[in-house]
Image (cartoon, rainbow, N blue to C red):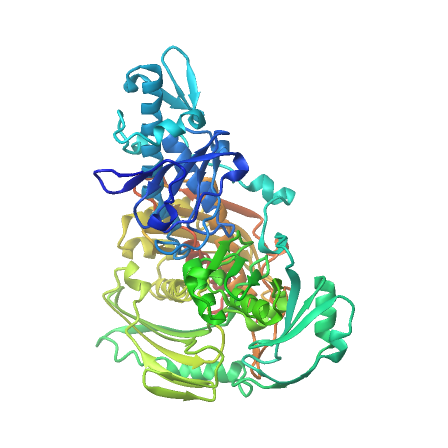
């Protein structure tokens, strides 16, 4: 039985026996662990959220996003608990498997923004139906009833759990009370700093990641990969490996040679016993210096500056950077002749299912993708190369496999942020900036590890070419800088690139904020005062004022120490960052203090937002001061955290504070927001402390 509300935003599905999955594009319920369930409300918008209440009084909403440490399950649980008046402990947010339609994209700092309305509307509708069901049971006016602690309460003190009312509520077509979400003034859960609902499971080891899954017959699997990017297998002698204890299969795949064994210890041992001849990849003649040279040459000309103006100019280089999520890539695959089942952490499960199906030669209707939580991502799990590889190995080996990419595999052969070169010119006259130009070129991937491809009608041979593009949407519109222009070029390399946290802004805004500081110095103005006088947005000025006050901007510091500041606006949100750095030893600088302030509209979980900002501060410290990838003759030099020098505890700020500005606006994005401001502030603090003009990042590379 299906009933659509007049607003056409929600659909009631009941009884439980009805197959709503085919109609709605969602998978069947998975609340069995809590006993029999009742589907109470199904969203008919593109999120297609399904709200169930089990007999055990658990509220279950399957989330069409992936949890990769950003806390989205907690934020959505808070939205549901708020509108239902449920206890947060009674709300479960399992991850939805790949569907046939709707929105399952996790990225672009969009999850809270896109789910805020649908999740609250879903829960508000469920609450109205539960109250109406209780009113009918007790023969009382629905308006006299209240909800709290996952139950309905009558004026005389009688209570009924949601679980006891769900079957009746599912059959209610027209609730007797309003199903509109609460106004912000009535929020008791949303906006309150809240610990993660999965924190205990994470710290006690109960949370399950792909590597923890026990899928029948799935054996540990690793792949021997070429020493250079895009290298190809010429020949392999696998006799010694096959003869080793615990080895089940050795199969050739596009990326190398896979070993399936009884344990990862056996698999790695056998992998090391393979005798392989490799053909070098298409970039074997290229190293960092040549790539930087090509990038510099690919930056478009900015044209002539305004007549009568003086110039502040800078050229900036940013290295390749690995995502390096703490949990290495792992995928479990069970591919049969007529069907396939895959388990992995994916930010794009619908696209992944389609690509996996194509790779193994099955219709996508025969491929089932289970989305598993991930231990970090930063954009890495937008791509699903490990899952496709696991599926192909399973098909070739004719058995289920649990494929793990080692840390070295992912750093040397996985996705990375492309290197880029920026040329910025600020033209000033009569004490103000009258024109601002930002031209840049980046390494971009035109094809997947091939020696030849066609891009825009141009044949690309030998792995590299240079093309011009444009215009570039420059972030400098944040300031009142007169005529703002941007353009871009690219160097196409046969290497695996991917979206890295704060995709373009992480380098563009960093470079621009450095130039803003240098313009202020040229004009003899304080960096904060100069920004305040030129920023267009009052909200950005407010966060800047907050960090300047909280961080005691301008306070005297010893020689070799300094403060730096930067701002950023994106995703309907804005942020400012103030950094204090000790660069007494310029080769070993230490950020000692970070103060951040953000306006993200409604902050569903301020504690989660604080954690996000803290993470972006570490990203800024890492990519500006220490962490990057070198390319040596077509190979990535780094292979672990021993040489890919991401910030550790000893490099983290001694003091960190985050200030969330109050707002009743709809939520903006926050996951990537802080990276550009943090990176810019670190760079500016280092420049002031060392009295230098840093141009290549990371600085100590």
Q: Nearer the viewer, residue 617 or 203?
A: 203
Q: Is residue 418 left or right of residue 187?
A: right
Q: Is residue 197 above or below residue 624?
A: above
Residue 610 location, x and y as percent? 47, 45
Residue 523 location, x and y as percent? 33, 64
Identify the residue at horizontal 40%, vertical 51% (top origin).
576
Q: Nearer the viewer, residue 476 or 22?
A: 22
Q: Is residue 346 left or right of residue 275?
A: left
Q: Is residue 652 above or below residue 660?
A: below
Task: Say whether residue 447 is visible.
Answer: yes
Q: Is residue 532 left or right of residue 393?
A: left
Q: Quadrant of residue 16?
A: top left
Residue 208 location, x and y as percent? 59, 49
Q: Nearer the viewer, residue 597 or 133?
A: 133
Query: In the rendered view of the protein, which quadrant contains the N terminus?
Result: top left
Identify the residue at horizontal 43%, vertical 78% (top origin).
447
Query: In the rendered view of the protein, which quadrant contains the C terminus?
Result: bottom right
Q: Quadrant of residue 202?
A: top right
Count every numbered label the image shows and give the total: 0
Q: Is residue 620 above or below residue 13?
A: below
Identify the residue at horizontal 32%, vertical 40% (top origin).
663
Q: Nearer the viewer, residue 209 or 616?
A: 209
Identify the residue at horizontal 30%, vertical 59% (top origin).
478
Task: Say whether residue 348 is visible.
Answer: no
Residue 331 location, x and y as percent? 57, 61
């Amino acid at each position: 039985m299906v009933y659509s509300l007049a607003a056409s935003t929600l659909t009631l599905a009941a009884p439980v026996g009805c197959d709503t999955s085919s109609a709605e594009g969602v998978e069947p319920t998975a609340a069995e662990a809590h006993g029999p369930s009742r589907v109470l409300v199904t969203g008919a918008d593109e999120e297609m959220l399904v709200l169930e209440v089990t007999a055990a009084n658990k509220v279950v909403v399957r989330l069409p996003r992936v949890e990769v440490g950003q806390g989205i399950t907690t934020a959505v649980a808070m939205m549901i608990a708020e509108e239902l008046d449920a206890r947060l402990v009674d709300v479960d947010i399992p991850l939805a498997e790949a569907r046939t339609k709707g929105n399952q994209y996790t990225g672009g700092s969009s999850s809270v923004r896109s789910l805020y309305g649908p999740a609250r509307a879903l829960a508000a509708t469920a609450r109205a139906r539960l109250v109406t069901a209780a009113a009918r049971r007790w023969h009382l006016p629905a308006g006299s009833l209240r909800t709290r602690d996952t139950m309905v309460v009558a004026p005389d003190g009688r209570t009924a759990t949601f679980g006891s009312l769900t079957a009746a509520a599912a059959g209610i077509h027209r609730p007797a009370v309003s199903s509109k979400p609460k106004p912000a003034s009535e929020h008791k859960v949303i906006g309150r700093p809240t610990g993660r609902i999965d924190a205990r499971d994470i710290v006690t080891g109960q949370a399950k990641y792909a590597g923890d899954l026990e899928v029948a017959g799935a054996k540990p699997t690793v792949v021997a990969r070429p020493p250079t990017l895009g290298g190809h297998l010429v020949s392999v002698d696998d006799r010694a490996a096959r003869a080793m204890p615990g080895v089940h299969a050795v199969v050739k795949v596009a990326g190398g040679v896979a070993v399936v064994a009884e344990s990862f210890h056996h698999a790695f041992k056998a992998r090391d016993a393979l005798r392989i001849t490799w053909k070098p990849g298409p970039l074997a003649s290229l190293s960092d210096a040549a790539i930087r040279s090509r990038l510099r040459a690919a930056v478009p000309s900015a044209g002539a500056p305004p007549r009568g103006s003086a110039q502040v100019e800078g050229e900036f280089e940013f290295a390749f950077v690995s995502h390096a999520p703490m949990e290495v890539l792992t995928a479990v695959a069970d591919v049969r002749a007529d069907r396939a089942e895959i388990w992995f952490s994916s930010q794009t499960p619908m696209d992944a299912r389609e690509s996996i199906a194509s790779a193994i030669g099955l219709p996508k209707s025969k491929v089932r993708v289970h989305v598993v939580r991930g231990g970090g991502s930063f954009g890495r799990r937008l791509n699903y190369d490990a899952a496709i590889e696991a599926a192909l190995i399973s098909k070739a080996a004719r058995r289920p496999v649990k494929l793990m990419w080692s840390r070295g595999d992912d750093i040397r052969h996985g996705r990375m942020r492309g290197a880029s070169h920026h040329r910025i010119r600020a033209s000033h006259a009569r004490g103000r900036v009258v024109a601002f130009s930002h031209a840049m070129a980046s390494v971009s991937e035109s094809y997947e590890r091939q020696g030849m491809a066609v891009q825009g009608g141009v044949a690309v041979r030998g792995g590299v070419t240079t093309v011009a593009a444009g215009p570039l949407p420059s972030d400098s519109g944040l300031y009142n800088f007169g005529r703002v222009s941007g353009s871009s070029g690219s160097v196409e390399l046969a290497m695996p690139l991917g979206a890295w946290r704060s995709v373009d802004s992480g380098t563009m805004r960093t470079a621009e904020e450095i130039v803003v500081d240098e313009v202020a110095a040229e004009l003899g103005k304080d960096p904060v005062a100069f920004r305040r006088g030129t920023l267009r947005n009052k909200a950005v000025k407010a966060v800047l004022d907050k960090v300047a006050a909280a961080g005691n901007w301008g306070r005297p510091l010893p020689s070799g120490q300094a403060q730096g500041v930067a701002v950023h606006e994106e995703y309907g949100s804005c942020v400012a960052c103030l950094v204090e750095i000790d660069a007494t030893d310029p080769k070993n600088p230490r950020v000692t203090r970070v103060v951040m302030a953000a306006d993200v509209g409604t902050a569903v979980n301020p504690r989660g937002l604080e954690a996000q900002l803290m993470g972006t501060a570490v990203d800024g410290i890492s990519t500006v001061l220490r962490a990057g990838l070198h390319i040596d003759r077509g190979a990535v030099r780094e292979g672990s955290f021993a040489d890919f020098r991401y910030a550790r505890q000893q490099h983290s700020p001694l003091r960190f504070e985050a200030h969330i500005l109050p707002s009743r606006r709809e939520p903006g994005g926050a996951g990537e927001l802080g990276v550009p401001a943090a990176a810019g502030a670190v760079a500016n603090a280092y420049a002031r402390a060392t009295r230098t003009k840093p141009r290549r990042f990371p600085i100590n590379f």
